[in-house]
Image: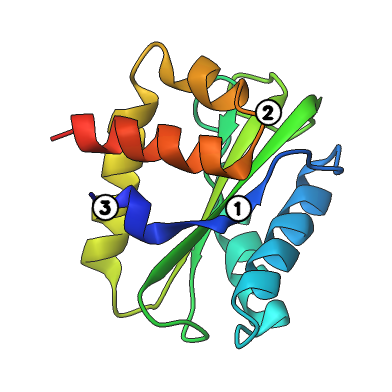
Amino acid sequence: MILGQVFNEKAIKLNLESEEKDEVLEEMVELLVSVYPSLNRDEILESVISRESKMSTGIKTAIAVPHGKTDAIEGVVGAIGISRTGIDYDSLDGKPVHLVFMMLSSKGDCEYHLRVLRHLSQVMDSKSFYEDIINQTTAQGVYSTLCKYDSETK
Protein backbone atom coordinates (compact mmCIF):
# COMPACT_ATOMS: atom_id res chain seq x y z
CA MET A 1 0.00 0.00 0.00
CA ILE A 2 1.74 3.13 -1.25
CA LEU A 3 -0.73 5.95 -0.59
CA GLY A 4 -1.28 4.93 3.03
CA GLN A 5 2.43 5.46 3.63
CA VAL A 6 2.56 8.89 1.95
CA PHE A 7 -0.63 10.44 3.29
CA ASN A 8 -1.02 10.82 7.03
CA GLU A 9 -4.34 10.91 8.87
CA LYS A 10 -3.08 13.97 10.78
CA ALA A 11 -2.48 15.78 7.49
CA ILE A 12 -6.12 15.75 6.39
CA LYS A 13 -8.25 18.87 6.53
CA LEU A 14 -11.97 18.31 6.05
CA ASN A 15 -12.99 21.94 5.54
CA LEU A 16 -10.51 24.00 3.58
CA GLU A 17 -11.11 27.72 4.02
CA SER A 18 -9.40 28.92 0.84
CA GLU A 19 -11.37 29.85 -2.26
CA GLU A 20 -8.47 30.49 -4.66
CA LYS A 21 -5.50 28.44 -5.82
CA ASP A 22 -2.71 30.51 -4.22
CA GLU A 23 -4.54 30.52 -0.90
CA VAL A 24 -5.14 26.76 -0.90
CA LEU A 25 -1.49 26.05 -1.71
CA GLU A 26 -0.50 28.07 1.36
CA GLU A 27 -3.19 26.44 3.50
CA MET A 28 -2.05 22.96 2.49
CA VAL A 29 1.62 23.81 3.12
CA GLU A 30 0.65 25.10 6.58
CA LEU A 31 -1.11 21.78 7.21
CA LEU A 32 2.01 19.84 6.24
CA VAL A 33 4.25 22.04 8.41
CA SER A 34 1.89 21.54 11.38
CA VAL A 35 2.32 17.76 11.04
CA TYR A 36 6.01 17.84 10.05
CA PRO A 37 7.43 20.86 11.95
CA SER A 38 10.96 20.32 10.62
CA LEU A 39 9.81 21.30 7.11
CA ASN A 40 10.89 24.68 5.81
CA ARG A 41 7.59 26.36 4.96
CA ASP A 42 8.97 28.86 2.47
CA GLU A 43 11.06 26.29 0.62
CA ILE A 44 8.26 23.79 0.19
CA LEU A 45 5.76 26.48 -0.79
CA GLU A 46 8.20 27.72 -3.43
CA SER A 47 8.62 24.21 -4.84
CA VAL A 48 4.85 23.73 -5.16
CA ILE A 49 4.27 27.19 -6.67
CA SER A 50 7.14 26.66 -9.11
CA ARG A 51 5.65 23.37 -10.30
CA GLU A 52 2.17 24.86 -10.51
CA SER A 53 3.43 27.74 -12.68
CA LYS A 54 4.36 25.24 -15.40
CA MET A 55 0.86 23.80 -15.69
CA SER A 56 -2.18 23.57 -13.45
CA THR A 57 -2.37 20.41 -11.37
CA GLY A 58 -6.18 20.65 -11.39
CA ILE A 59 -6.14 17.61 -13.63
CA LYS A 60 -9.31 15.63 -12.90
CA THR A 61 -12.82 16.95 -12.47
CA ALA A 62 -12.98 18.59 -9.01
CA ILE A 63 -9.53 17.19 -8.03
CA ALA A 64 -6.10 18.84 -7.87
CA VAL A 65 -2.76 17.23 -7.12
CA PRO A 66 -0.27 20.02 -6.40
CA HIS A 67 3.20 18.64 -5.84
CA GLY A 68 6.80 19.72 -5.61
CA LYS A 69 10.33 18.48 -5.16
CA THR A 70 12.69 19.99 -2.66
CA ASP A 71 15.75 19.18 -0.60
CA ALA A 72 13.76 20.37 2.43
CA ILE A 73 12.32 16.87 2.82
CA GLU A 74 13.35 13.23 2.73
CA GLY A 75 11.12 10.74 0.97
CA VAL A 76 7.56 11.60 -0.01
CA VAL A 77 4.84 13.08 2.23
CA GLY A 78 1.35 14.26 1.46
CA ALA A 79 -1.71 16.08 2.74
CA ILE A 80 -5.36 15.93 1.74
CA GLY A 81 -7.82 18.81 1.82
CA ILE A 82 -11.53 18.94 1.11
CA SER A 83 -13.36 22.12 0.11
CA ARG A 84 -17.11 22.01 0.53
CA THR A 85 -17.60 25.27 -1.43
CA GLY A 86 -15.03 24.76 -4.19
CA ILE A 87 -11.76 26.45 -5.10
CA ASP A 88 -11.12 28.58 -8.18
CA TYR A 89 -8.05 26.58 -9.18
CA ASP A 90 -7.46 27.38 -12.86
CA SER A 91 -8.18 23.71 -13.54
CA LEU A 92 -7.76 22.22 -16.98
CA ASP A 93 -11.54 21.74 -17.22
CA GLY A 94 -12.28 25.22 -15.81
CA LYS A 95 -14.36 23.81 -12.94
CA PRO A 96 -13.83 24.36 -9.20
CA VAL A 97 -11.73 21.93 -7.20
CA HIS A 98 -13.16 20.25 -4.10
CA LEU A 99 -10.47 17.67 -3.33
CA VAL A 100 -6.75 18.47 -3.04
CA PHE A 101 -3.93 15.95 -2.70
CA MET A 102 -0.65 17.78 -2.03
CA MET A 103 2.60 15.84 -2.29
CA LEU A 104 6.17 16.79 -1.55
CA SER A 105 9.24 14.73 -2.28
CA SER A 106 12.97 15.03 -2.13
CA LYS A 107 14.70 15.83 -5.40
CA GLY A 108 16.44 12.46 -5.32
CA ASP A 109 13.20 10.49 -5.01
CA CYS A 110 11.93 11.02 -8.58
CA GLU A 111 11.11 7.37 -9.21
CA TYR A 112 9.07 6.96 -6.03
CA HIS A 113 7.42 10.37 -6.58
CA LEU A 114 6.23 9.24 -10.02
CA ARG A 115 5.11 5.88 -8.65
CA VAL A 116 2.96 7.63 -6.03
CA LEU A 117 1.47 9.96 -8.66
CA ARG A 118 0.68 7.00 -10.89
CA HIS A 119 -0.95 5.11 -8.00
CA LEU A 120 -2.99 8.16 -7.03
CA SER A 121 -4.10 8.58 -10.64
CA GLN A 122 -5.24 4.96 -10.79
CA VAL A 123 -7.22 5.36 -7.56
CA MET A 124 -8.83 8.56 -8.88
CA ASP A 125 -9.94 6.70 -12.01
CA SER A 126 -12.38 4.66 -9.94
CA LYS A 127 -15.87 6.02 -10.58
CA SER A 128 -16.86 5.95 -6.91
CA PHE A 129 -13.59 7.20 -5.38
CA TYR A 130 -14.36 10.94 -5.46
CA GLU A 131 -17.83 10.56 -3.95
CA ASP A 132 -16.61 8.12 -1.31
CA ILE A 133 -13.83 10.49 -0.19
CA ILE A 134 -15.84 13.73 -0.37
CA ASN A 135 -18.66 12.24 1.73
CA GLN A 136 -16.38 11.37 4.65
CA THR A 137 -16.90 13.40 7.83
CA THR A 138 -13.70 12.48 9.69
CA ALA A 139 -10.01 12.44 8.84
CA GLN A 140 -9.97 8.74 9.78
CA GLY A 141 -12.78 8.12 7.29
CA VAL A 142 -10.88 9.89 4.50
CA TYR A 143 -7.68 8.01 5.31
CA SER A 144 -9.43 4.63 5.54
CA THR A 145 -11.23 5.23 2.24
CA LEU A 146 -7.98 6.18 0.52
CA CYS A 147 -6.29 3.06 1.90
CA LYS A 148 -9.21 0.87 0.78
CA TYR A 149 -8.97 2.11 -2.81
CA ASP A 150 -5.17 1.97 -2.68
CA SER A 151 -5.24 -1.68 -1.66
CA GLU A 152 -7.55 -2.47 -4.59
CA THR A 153 -5.12 -0.86 -7.07
CA LYS A 154 -2.35 -2.93 -8.61
**Residue 139 to residue 26: above or below:** above
Mark 3 residue type: Ile
Circle nearer the viewer, 2 or 3: 3
Mark closer to the observer (1, 3): 3
- Mark 1 secondary-structure assignment: helix
Q: Nearer the viewer, mark 1 or mark 2?
A: 2
The kind of residue on which mark 2 rests is: His
Q: Work out whether mark 1 precedes mark 3 in sequence or the reverse, and give the earlier one.
A: 3
When asked about the image quadrant of residue 106, the answer is bottom left
Up-down: is 132 above or below 6? above
Q: Residue at x 45, y 65 (%)?
A: 77
Q: Quadrant of residue 89?
A: top right
Which one is in front, 60 or 99?
99
Q: CA distance from mark 2 to mark 3?
A: 23 Å
- Residue 14: x %, y % from top left: 71, 39
Instruction: Identify the disc placed on residue 131.
Output: none
Left or right: residue 104 compared with residue 48: left
Q: Amino acid at mark 1?
A: Glu
Q: Position of residue 58 (x, y in %)?
A: 58, 34
Q: Residue at x 28, y 31 (%)?
A: 122
Give percent across and percent down for residue 154: 13, 35
Picture coordinates of residue 23 (x, y %)?
A: 83, 51
Query: CA separation, marks 1 and 3?
Result: 24 Å
Q: Residue at x 43, y 21 (%)?
A: 129
Q: Is residue 101 above or below residue 40?
A: above
Marks 2 and 3, the one that precedes in the sequence: 3
> Residue 52, which numbered label?
1
Instruction: Give the labeled residue for mark 3.
Output: 2
Q: Nearer the viewer, residue 111 or 33?
A: 33
Which residue position is annotated with label 2? Answer: 98
For the residues labelled 1 and 3, say whether their Cβ atoms are less than 8 Å apart: no
